[in-house]
Amino acid sequence: MSKIRVALIEDHDLTRVGIRTALQQRSEIEFVGEAANAAEGLNLLETARPDIGIVDIGLPDMDGIELTRRFKDAQSSEEEAQTRILVLTLQDNEDAVLAAFAAGADSYCMKNISFDNLLEAIQVTNEGNAWIDPAIAKIVLNKTKSMDRGTETAAALKTVTINATESEYSKLIEADPLTERELEVLQLIVEGCSNAAIAERLYITVGTVKTHVRNILNKLCADDRTQAAVRALRSGLVG
């Protein structure tokens, strides 16, 4: 199994050293470099092309959201190996969350996250799925409920593609309802659990989890786990 190549962009010395040290102790992680500001960080991402770039929002010379936007804009969609961005921040306000998604961030973690959960977030993100704190999912949900169509906020939310109304979700669910087990899996997706964590929690195999996830995405007409989580919250399937 190939290692997950990770780069870290964080201006706070103690945080950066702590994360770097923890990552370097994991056999499944290859730590490819670190940077203390956005200029160095952007160069690191462009030259090292890691699997995962952990980016702090509060960088001194350019915020991590703008760094993410510039890097994602420059990264060709046709590139075989895409670098995914995991935003790490103390900010859980609506503006920061929505701006990060709009900039193209793939996952969003709070800095008070445990290292085990950060590692899980890295693994989930590397699998091509989004890791999103439950509190962050609820922020997105609350914002979508209060926004008007055609606003700047609506445009910012296109990265999580929340297009259907509550009534449309209800029709989808009525036409092809989720099973009790799929609802359990969906709840854990909303909580940010990886496939492995879901398997452990529900005492089933990872392969079975993947089947449930695929069925959930199909039934909710969702492209990925983040979209499924937000749609599940909007429809009231999970709380």
Image (spheres, grey):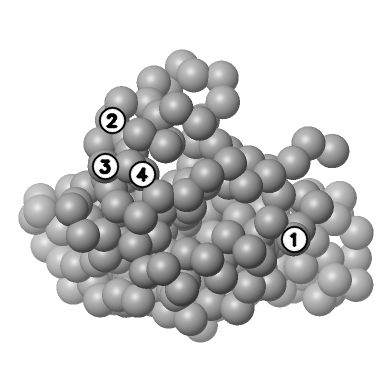
Direction from residue 124 to residue 75 in the image, left or right: left
Comes first in the chain, label 4 or label 2: 4
Which amino acid, mark 3? Ala
Q: Residues within 10 Å of mark 4 (few under 14, many from 20)?
A: many
Please tell me which residue lies in front, 55 or 163: 55
Circle 2 residue:
73
**Looking at the image, which residue is at 90% across and 72% down?**
203
Direction from residue 190 to residue 46 in the image, left or right: left
Circle 4 residue:
41
Comes first in the chain, label 3 or label 1: 1
Comes first in the chain, label 2 or label 3: 3
Q: Residues within 10 Å of mark 3 (few under 14, many from 20)?
A: some
Disc 2 and disc 3 in contact, CB within 8 angstroms: no
Disc 4 and disc 3 in contact, CB within 8 angstroms: yes
Circle 1 residue:
25
Which amino acid, mark 4? Gly
Name the secondary structure under disc 1.
Answer: loop
Foreground disc of the pair 4, 2: 4
Circle 3 residue:
39
Which amino acid, mark 2? Asp
Which amino acid, mark 1? Gln
Residue 112, relative to residue 124: is it above or below?
A: below
